[in-house]
Image (spheres, coloured by chain):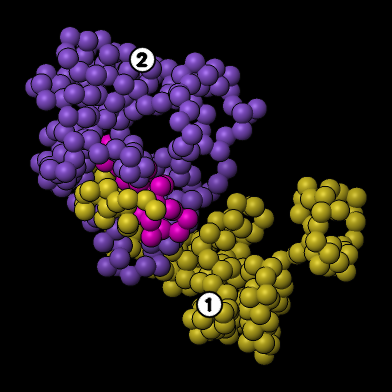
Chain colours: A purple, B yellow
């Protein structure tokens, strides 16, 4: 049981920081004391950046990713392949795929996965807008890059059914053992799938 | 090498969070996305609490701890023993000592310890004001509760010399093995000191 510090202003700031995910009271106190040691302009710049983001940020009209403009730079880019859409859960996943430098298409951010346990139904996600993009006819392939969880699988299957009537190739990112993984420590579901979905060996290392 | 997300507003907020101690880019991104999912009023309340703290917080005239008023509730309390001052490095330490419920005196926050390596000299700390409090004559004991480090020891010694001319009892919080520590894993300096500074056994457990 930790006692409160006798300053309402201080306690209030600590309480606000403690609301953030993964930030406990101790870390919150440390962060608040750090900010308190900074010049006022720094603190205002910190607070201002967050409020400005919340007030001014836009969601890209096409992919629903975060953007400063109506259409995000990726969707607006003429060098990207607009006929291939990679479906991801959130914007961190866009960054993760971009960092691989293996994808030259465009994205579609669902905003989560179907999860009845967490009260997330298909209507809460950007699935209708994905179907709409496909319905326009220029999309050749939709790559599903959701988490390899039951919720991700459910969402994959839901999208599969929604897109069944359209002439579009649907694929799922490969699941298998990770680079560097040891076989004996790989769970049997992953290892089993990686045997079933084995790929021809071409003599080249990936 | 992580790529930047193509939104300057977003990158700015992530950069601000990344400046906080112990917050890397990944955690910063997670926190910013969390705030982005909150209603605008919540985000404004978060930012407002921090700015308000920085602008309105006061430092107690006596102990230099954080306070909403000129004199903090501890220094203003008639039930605390104002003749015993516990000297601590920072306000977290006040909370730590308060949580023990073993101290009924008042505090003095130095704002750090003497550390030539970090460019902290005695003039940067609230040492002169401590001497002044003692010089007023009502203080019977000063308890030094600084970190058991070289810097803490240096600061203890500096204060010891500064208070040498005053009729005040100077003590240091006991150092020894922690409750629950195993003797064989205790470092020899700590164990050695705890033997030299052994205390009479009264038959009562602490």
> For mark 1, what is the residue?
B118
In three-dimensional space, the C-alpha distance between marks 2 and 1, rounded to whole angstroms, equals: 55 Å
B195 falls in the magenta region: no
Q: Residue at x 21, y 21 (%)?
A: A127
Q: Do discs 2 and 1 belong to a common subunit?
A: no
State left or right for residue B147 relative to residue A50: right
Q: Quadrant of residue A70?
A: top left
Q: Secondary structure at mark 1?
A: helix
Q: Residue at x 45, y 51 (%)?
A: A28
Dominant secondary structure of the magenta stretch?
helix
Where does the N terminus of chain A fall, quadrant-wise? Answer: top right
Q: Chain of mark 1?
A: B
**Along the line of sight, which residue is nearer the eye, B87 or B27?**
B27
**Along the line of sight, which residue is nearer the eye, B159 or B82?**
B159
Q: Position of residue B155 (x, y in %)?
A: 63, 78
Q: Is residue B56 visible?
A: no
> For mark 2, what is the residue?
A154
- What number is the disc on residue B41? none
Q: Position of residue B33 (x, y in %)?
A: 31, 41
Span colored in magenta: B17-39
Q: Is residue A111 above or below residue A97?
A: above
């Amino acid at each position: 049981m930790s006692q409160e510090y006798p300053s309402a202003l201080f306690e209030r700031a600590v309480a606000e920081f403690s609301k953030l995910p993964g930030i406990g009271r101790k870390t919150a106190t440390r962060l608040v004391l750090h900010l308190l040691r900074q010049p006022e302009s720094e603190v205002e710049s910190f607070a201002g950046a967050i409020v400005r983001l919340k007030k001014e940020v836009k969601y890209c009209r096409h992919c629903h990713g975060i953007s400063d403009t109506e259409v995000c730079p990726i969707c607006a880019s003429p060098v990207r392949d607009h006929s291939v859409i990679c479906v991801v859960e959130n914007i961190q996943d866009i960054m993760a795929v971009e960092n691989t430098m293996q994808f030259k298409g465009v994205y579609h951010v669902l905003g989560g996965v179907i999860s009845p346990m967490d009260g997330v139904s298909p209507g809460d996600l950007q699935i209708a807008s994905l179907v709409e993009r496909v319905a326009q006819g220029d999309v050749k392939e939709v790559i599903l890059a959701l988490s390899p969880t039951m919720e991700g699988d459910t969402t994959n299957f839901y999208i599969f059914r929604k897109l069944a009537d359209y002439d579009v190739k649907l694929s799922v990112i490969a699941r298998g053992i990770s680079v560097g993984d040891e076989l004996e420590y790989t769970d049997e579901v992953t290892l089993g799938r990686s045997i079933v979905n084995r790929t021809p060996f071409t003599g080249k290392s990936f």
